[in-house]
Image: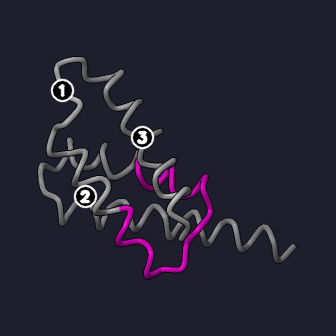
């Protein structure tokens, strides 16, 4: 995964998160958790900027809902897997 794609996806998700949560500090722990999650996607070989954005937004949403990093990672991973499957199905047509 390119560093630029990773940074861009995280920046997009974090900017939108701050717009929705006005009381959150720019340097909140969730930001570093987001970067850690997206960085760990490197092992999947995923480098699609759009899918990285979806994963980043899903991770932050699930982190708020579940209040648990591991569960948020799993939920975002499941969404990403669904999107990858749908994407490959469309390419097979």
Q: Which residue, given by chain and number where applicable, does mark 1 sit on?
A: 24
Relative placement, left or right, of 56 versus 89 is left
Q: Of the residues under marks 2 and 3, which one precedes in the sequence?
A: 3
Q: Residues within 10 Å of mark 1 (few under 14, many from 20)?
A: few
Secondary structure mostly taken by the magenta-highlighted segment of the chain:
helix
Separation (CA) of disc 1 from disc 3: 14 Å
- Answer few, some or many: residues within 10 Å of disc 3's Cα (few below 14, many 20 plus, some between 14 and 19): many
Identify residue for label 3. Answer: 13
C-alpha distance separating marks 2 and 3: 15 Å
Q: CA distance from mark 1 to mark 2?
A: 19 Å
Q: Residue at x 59, y 68 (%)?
A: 47
Callout 3: SS: helix
User: Left or right: 1 with respect to 75?
Assistant: right
Q: Secondary structure at mark 1?
A: loop
50 over 71 or under it: above or below? above
Q: Nearer the viewer, residue 59 or 85?
A: 59
Going from N to C along the chain, the mark reached first, 1 or 3, is 3
Outermost front residue: 3
- The residue pinned by badge 2 equals 72
- Quadrant assignment, res 27: top left
Q: Which segment is the magenta one?
A: 38-56
């Amino acid at each position: 995964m390119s560093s630029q794609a990773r940074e861009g996806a995280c920046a997009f998700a974090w900017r939108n998160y701050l717009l929705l949560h006005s009381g959150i500090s720019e340097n909140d722990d969730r930001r570093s958790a987001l970067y850690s999650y997206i960085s760990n996607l490197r092992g999947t070989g995923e480098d699609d900027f759009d899918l990285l954005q979806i994963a980043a937004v899903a991770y932050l949403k699930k982190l708020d809902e579940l209040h648990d990093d591991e569960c948020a990672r799993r939920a975002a991973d499941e969404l990403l897997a669904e999107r990858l499957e749908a994407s490959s199905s469309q390419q097979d047509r």
